[in-house]
Image (spheres, rainbow, N blue to C red):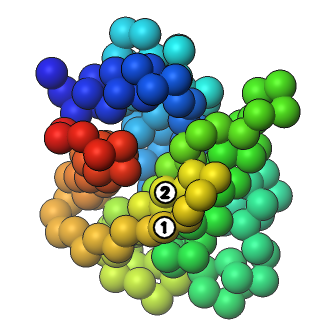
Amino acid sequence: MTTAAVVVAALIERGLTIAVAESLTGGKLVAALIDVPGASKTVLGGVVAYNTALKASVLGVDAALLAERGAVDDEVARQLASGARLTLAVDGRAADIGIATTGVAGPDPQDGKPVGTVFIGLATAESVASVALQLSGRREDIRNAVVSESLVQLAKLLGIEP
């Protein structure tokens, strides 16, 4: 069973919903979740906010924070995850879990951050956190590694083995 399948099964079993906000992964994370049969019972949706301005206008990330630190930042990741929970609410109910990815896949540095700098944001009603990664490899390798690590972080959040 894949990590995505384990995570989706746990979310369904617990009656939890999830919403995704992605930048560098460009929809790959929500696609990995949706590839699992039955995912419609738990995955509310995803937003690909590739352009920095969309992170503020669609997902509610503080525009001053984006101007000061850029999009590749731990607090931006946390705000993206929280924004996903709230923005993708259904019938006025926020998602139980929000997850977000932001970082630099390359080929060039961004916002003064080197290629491979990544932040994964995780938000629930009770807590908001981020995980920092420093990855290496080709652009596609980095993007795929972020999806894999995001699924592992979801499993950890749920207290299950990936």
Q: Is residue 73 above or below residue 118?
A: below
Q: Residue at x 82, y 58 (%)?
A: 57
Left of 139 or right of it: where is 22? Answer: right
* Left or right of 106 in this view: 72: right
Res. 8 image quadrant: top left
- In the depicted structure, whether residue 158 falls above or below residue 125: above
Q: Which residue is outermost to the top?
A: 37
Name which of mark 2 and mark 1 comes first in the sequence: 2
Q: Quadrant of residue 52?
A: bottom right
Helix, strand or loop at mark 2? strand
Q: Amino acid at mark 1?
A: Ala
Residue in view at x 44 percent, y 20 percent: 12
Q: Position of residue 119 (x, y in %)?
A: 42, 68
Q: Position of residue 13 (x, y in %)?
A: 40, 20
| Frontmost residue, 141 versus 149 | 149
Q: Which residue is under mark 1? A: 129
**Type of amino acid under label 2:** Leu
Tag shown at residue 36: none
Location of the N terminus by quadrant is top left
Any part of residue 8 in sight: no
Q: Which residue is mark 2?
A: 122
Label 1 crowding class (10 Å Cα cut-off): few <14, some 14-19, many 20+? Answer: some
Cβ atoms at labels 2 and 1 below 8 Å apart: yes
Q: Alpha-carbon distance for marks 2 and 1? A: 5 Å
> Which element type, helix, strand or loop, lies under badge 1?
strand
Give residue 71's position: percent from left, percent from top. Answer: 58, 73
Relative to 48, is 14 above or below? above
> In this view of the protein, which residue sits in the foreground, 25 or 87?
87
Question: 134 or 17: nearer the eye?
Answer: 17
